[in-house]
Image (cartoon, rainbow, N blue to C red):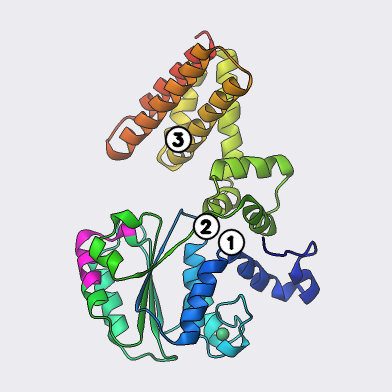
Amino acid sequence: MPWVPKRPLWKRFGERSRGFFLKLRELIGHHEIIRGLQSGLLSGNLAHSFLFAGPSGIGKATVAHRYAQALLCTNPQNAGPSQLGCQQCAACHKVELRCHADLQWVEKEEGKTRISVDQIRELTRFLSLTPMESNWKVAIVDDAAQMNAAAANALLKTLEEPPANSVVILVTCRPGVLLATIRSRCMKYYFHALSEDDFARILMEKVDLAHDQWETVRDYSEGDLGFALRFVQEGQLSECHQLIQEMEQLVRAGSLGKLCEVAEYWSQANRFALAQFVIRQWIMEKVRDCVTSESRPQRVRAWLTMETFANEVFSLAETNNINKRLLLEGIFIKVLRISGAVL
Ligand SMILES: [Zn+2]
């Protein structure tokens, strides 16, 4: 367990240092990986390609970003013992802003579902150029599992014959989706979920949450820090509470008109993903309540069946063009029946 002072370090060093310490803390929980990367840097025996794999939202891309800083930093001797890059030089700042000439960050483009072969060809061209401001050309592909087949094959060719002084970091939460031939060419680092203490510390530094809200975020994000931050910062926490209240109200009042209204509202494209998430968690909560309150076995079974049903229909909705309003109505009607509400 790392030592963490009660008083945040940035308060001792002034407001301007706050961003730096927050970033440093994002690396908490991945000490072994940081040490492995640092020792590679010190030995000078660097791999050309890395695979950072592990659950989403726990800091893989952040570590990739810091590793790019370490490679491109002009004052690496000033980096602290648990740091990657000095975080002070112009190169580190440019990497931070993703505007360093020797760094390329590849992710799926706005409105697209996959990383295209053109993006990977551009990456290959970039890596083949001589470094402009440092000794390395660094490319980060996040999420690498989003490459389409042509893109993956193009990347494989680059990994098979990597240009000198090039480093490619593939980031993904689904390493199994990558070609085995790509995986086998990478030095692999497997990231593990943050401990609850680390997760809480990082989140509480970034967003202001009341204690009861914090518990909701922790439960709903299931350790996914990136999700938790978006969840709070994009106002989804309050939307989440809204749906929970609406479902509780439906169970109490059993109004068919209200049920259709709620289903219509949450079936909209920009709300449906959050609705799925909240409904799944809400049903799980019901299962837990039944178990802890020692309800009759039939009741526990009914909620477990409900959970399976919800998971199945939501999975179907991901791959099929299903009417989402009808789907939600069906789920709500089933929920009301199990709850004993009368429509
Ligand atoms: Zn630096």
Label 1 secondary element: loop
Label 3 secondary element: helix
Task: Identify which residue is drawn at 60% across, 49% down.
Answer: 232
Which amino acid, mark 3?
Gln
Of label 2 and label 1, which has the lower sequence position? 1
Most common secondary structure along the magenta stretch? helix
* Image spot of residue 80 (x, y percent): 64, 81
Name the side, left or right, on which 295 lies relative to 55. Answer: right
Q: Mark on residue 58?
A: 2
Quote the CA–CA distance across marks 2 and 3.
Answer: 22 Å
Q: Mark on residue 187?
A: none
Name the side, left or right, on which 3 lies relative to 123. Answer: right
Residue wearing tag 3: 276
* Image spot of residue 30 (x, y percent): 55, 64
Asked whether disc 2 touches disc 3, contact meaning CB atoms under 8 Å apart, the reply is: no
Q: Nearer the viewer, mark 2 or mark 1?
A: 1
Task: Identify which residue is drawn at 56% across, 54% down.
Answer: 225
Magenta stretch containing residue 184, yes or no? Answer: no
* Image spot of residue 234 (x, y percent): 56, 50
Q: Is residue 256 above or below residue 119?
A: above
Of label 1 and label 3, which has the lower sequence position? 1
Label 2 secondary element: loop
- Does mark 1 have its CB less than 8 Å from ligand 1? no
Q: Residues within 10 Å of mark 2 (few under 14, many from 20)?
A: many
Specify the quarter for ligand 1.
bottom right
For the record, the magenta segment spans: 145-156
Residue toward you, 270 or 290: 290
Q: Please identify the quarter of the rendering in which residue 4 is found.
A: bottom right
Is the N terminus in the top left, top right, bottom left or bottom right quadrant? bottom right
Residue wearing tag 1: 29
Asked whether disc 2 touches disc 1, contact meaning CB atoms under 8 Å apart, the reply is: yes
* Image spot of residue 236 (x, y percent): 56, 44
